[in-house]
Each structure stands twice: as C-alpha cells, then as structure tokens.
Amino acid sequence: MLLTKVEPDRKHRSRYLLYFDGSDEAALSVHEDILVRYRLLKGQTLDAALLAEVAAEDGRYRAYAAAVYYLGFKPRTSKEIERYLARKEFDEESISHTLDRLNGEALINDGEYARMFAAQRMRGALKGRRLIRQELQVRGIAKETAAKAAEALDPQAELDAAMRAAEKKWRSLKGEPIDRKRKLTAFLLRRGFPGETARAAVRSISEGEQGDDEGLWLDN
C-alpha cells in the first residue's frame, strides 16, 4: 500500500491521518510519536504486516496514555486500570502491555496502594481490618496482598479508631447499659474491628455504667 497523504487529525491533537493509494478516506489515525518512529512519510510503501504493526503499536500507545490520564486523578489498582481500559474498548494485548509498563515504571504498585488505602480507611472512615480487607479485594487487590496490608495495621491505631467510632455511636444507643453495650459491640464488629478490639473499646466507652457482663457480648 502506498502512503499518498499524511495530514493532522483536526479532532485529536498530536495525531495524524494516513491515506493510502490515493483514497480520500483516511485508513488510520496515529500519534505523532508513532509517525516519527516508523518514519511514515508520503510516498512510503507499507505491506499488510507493517501496517498491522503500526496499528497495534498505536493502540498500545493510546492505552498507555489513557491509563496515565486516569492515574492523574488518584492512585489506582491494576484491576481498576484494567477495567477502565476495557470500558474504553482497548484490546487485551494493549491492556496487558500497559499494565506491564506501568508496573515497570512504578506508576502502579498494588502492595503500596493497599497499605495506603488501609491506613486511610482506618483513620478516616473508622473501619477495622476485616472490613478494609474486603474493600481492598473489591477494588481488585489480590487476596494475599489485601490480607497483608490489613494485618500490617497498627493495633493501637486500630483501637483508637474503634474508640472514636464507639464514642459517636454510644450517644445514639437506647436501652439498658448491657443492651447498649451489646449493640455497640455488634456495631464495631460490623465495621470490621476484631472482637478483642471491639470489646476493649466498649469497655472504655461504657466505663462507669451498670450491668457490665462481658459474657453477653457478641464474640469474634
């Protein structure tokens, strides 16, 4: 195929339209970096294999650019980027290539993301390690990586978070002291705090109340 015309793509900055064999209809749009890399100049002849290679390389380039743009808003997991690129209808090869490149350039790191996310959710959302581990897995973090990040949380910081959550909840609970403590314990367990952490927080919050009976508290 003879490349008979190369002109800027007015709809997309930094991209160029390629016309072959005198056709008035562009056969391909490529980024200027691809244009330079393959020296795509008017009068050049491209066979089907080379044209397919150019198209595939441009697809990888566009997928990578889209992923970097997506990462510009906030850190993402590998799975989040994969899903985003799939929604943009990039092919599997381009997506795989992009993820490999981003990992190689340390632009994504699921382990570091999991540690940062876990610490932030504990401090900001007042959630415990069990619920945080589940949230990480929902975001596409591998089960082992999610568990490692959750287990790395500082127990004292987690107790502090449980105390803050308990203080807010305690004021709204009604009933006898033992019932309020039972409800508060269940609330903290639902927020993902380990049993011992939940009970320690409840003991501290309810200190001085009557009817303390740990045997009636929810366990685990």
Image (spheres, rainbow, N blue to C red):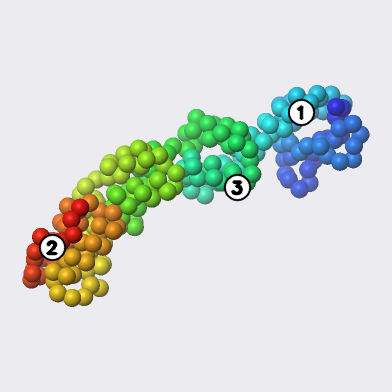
Task: Tell me the quarter of the image containing the N terminus.
Answer: top right
Rendered position, 53 above or below 190: above
Tell me where residue 154 sits by quadrant: top left
Residue at image location 49% in from the left, 37% down from the top: 107
Kindly report which numbered mark, 1 or 2, lies closer to the viewer in this rendering.
2
Q: Could you tell me how far apart the alpha carbons at marks 3 and 1 are, in whole angstroms?
A: 26 Å
Tell me where residue 217 sits by quadrant: bottom left
Q: Secondary structure at mark 3?
A: helix
Q: Which residue is mark 1?
A: 51
Kindly report which numbered mark, 2 or 3, lies closer to the viewer in this rendering.
2
Q: Secondary structure at mark 1?
A: helix
Q: Is residue 97 left or right of residue 24?
A: left
Q: Which residue is mark 3?
A: 87
Residue 178 x, y percent position in the rendering = 13, 69
Are the residues flagged by discs 1 and 2 in contact, CB closer than 8 Å?
no
Circle 2: is it few (<14), some (14-19), or many (20+) Cα within 10 Å? few
Q: Earlier in the sequence, mark 3 or mark 1?
A: 1
Label 3 sits on what residue type?
Answer: Arg
Q: Secondary structure at mark 2?
A: helix
Q: Earlier in the sequence, mark 1 or mark 2?
A: 1
Residue at image location 84% in from the left, 24% down from the top: 45
Q: Earlier in the sequence, mark 2 or mark 3?
A: 3
Residue 13 x, y percent position in the rendering = 72, 44
Residue at image location 13% in from the left, 71% down from the top: 177
Furthest toward the right, the residue is 22
Q: Is residue 218 visible?
A: yes
Residue 160 x, y percent position in the rendering = 22, 55
Label 2 sits on what residue type?
Answer: Leu
